[in-house]
Amino acid sequence: MKIADIPVNEQARVADLHGLQILDTPPEERFDRLTRLARRLFSVPMAVVSLVDTKRQWFKAHAGVDTCETGRDVSFCAHAILRDDVMVVPNALEDDRFKDNPLVTGDPFIRFYAGCPIRSPHGHKLGTLCVLDTIPRQFDADDQALLSDLARMVEQEMAAVHLATMDELTKLSNRRGFESLSQHALNMCKRLARPASLLYFDLDLFKQINDRFGHAEGDHALVTFSTILAANFRESDVIGRLGGDEFAVFLTNTGGQETATVLGHFEQAIERHNQTGKRGYDLLYSVGAIEYDPASHDTIGDLMNSADALMYQQKKRRREAS
Ligand SMILES: Nc1nc2c(ncn2[C@@H]2O[C@H](COP(=O)(O)OP(=O)(O)OP(=O)(O)O)[C@@H](O)[C@H]2O)c(=O)[nH]1
């Protein structure tokens, strides 16, 4: 058996896949429909929308296949994502890469495989739409074109998932995306008994930027703030625009002391921007920082409420002081 090579852009590819927040989500009719359609069109017993994760392939939709994931080492799709066109294996028993693969020698006894790469909106190959059979088959150019068309439909559905969780202006997660991603991250910290913290930001006097310089300049300020956030927190932190001029960051494996340090660096970065930006106004914000406490925070919503309340206290103090 040959284990597939790792794509050259693996890190960016996996980051993109994780950013979609589609892994381990419940089955959805719009994807199931496409695997059912593929199965019927090609008269095969199995069709799968498979996403190739770091160490596993996870099935967003699987018709005729019981399991919803396998190891990446045995994955046919891990090979298919290395190419741009459809990968066809007419008979796995005659293919050195697969003849002793446990999915060939054992359940589900794959003989035939055809998989078309599925690309993210950013162009990374996330996985495939593939059809499988327990008997050898041929798959001609027309079949391959048809499978590619179906794969494009899967990509369209993926793009819809992406849009539903992403803020169009800043390209950060929107509230929905942030809540779902950071809830996953919080569960992980709970399980591993690691600290976590949440920061809740709200820009101060943002309305004035819109009023004095126009809405486009307001948009520019929001994008600049997002960029400075993204540059100053770790790639593993979850950053979101909750709406309007509100942002949040969920820091995994980070306690109160470390959060204060990171926040200090962020403050300096904003100050540097204000000194050099020369746009006629300063970016100002209030922030509430809260450390995860298992005794008082059950969900990410609890943490957000606590941090929001702290943010508001700071905003009030600033208003009163000015
Ligand atoms: N340019 C722009 N403005 C937005 C966007 N979304 C919301 N806003 C505006 O952001 C403003 C947010 O209101 P507030 O939070 O009350 O404004 P603020 O001046 O920061 O008030 P304080 O937080 O009390 O300092 C409103 O005027 C919204 O119209 C956007 O995507 N782009």
Image: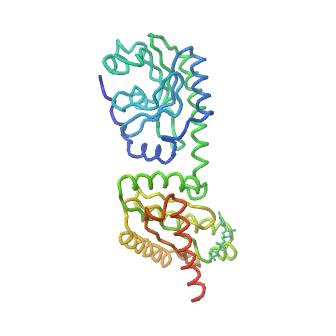
Residue 85 on image: x %, y %: 48, 26
Q: Which sits in the foreground, 262 or 83?
A: 262
Tell me if 81 is positioned left or right of 45 in this view.
left
Q: Residue at x 60, y 58 (%)?
A: 169
Q: Residue at x 56, y 21 (%)?
A: 145
Protein image colouring: rainbow
Quarter placement of the N terminus: top left
Q: Residue furthest front?
A: 295
Q: Residue at x 34, y 21 (%)?
A: 102
For residue 143, above or below residue 262 = above
- Quarter holding ligand 1: bottom right
Q: Which sits in the foreground, 217 or 29?
A: 29
Q: Residue at x 50, y 52 (%)?
A: 181
Quarter placement of the C terminus: bottom right
Q: Residue furthest bottom?
A: 321
Residue 164 on image: x %, y %: 61, 48
For residue 287, above or below residue 241 = below
For residue 178, above or below residue 305 = above
Tell me if 13 is positioned left or right of 215 in this view.
left
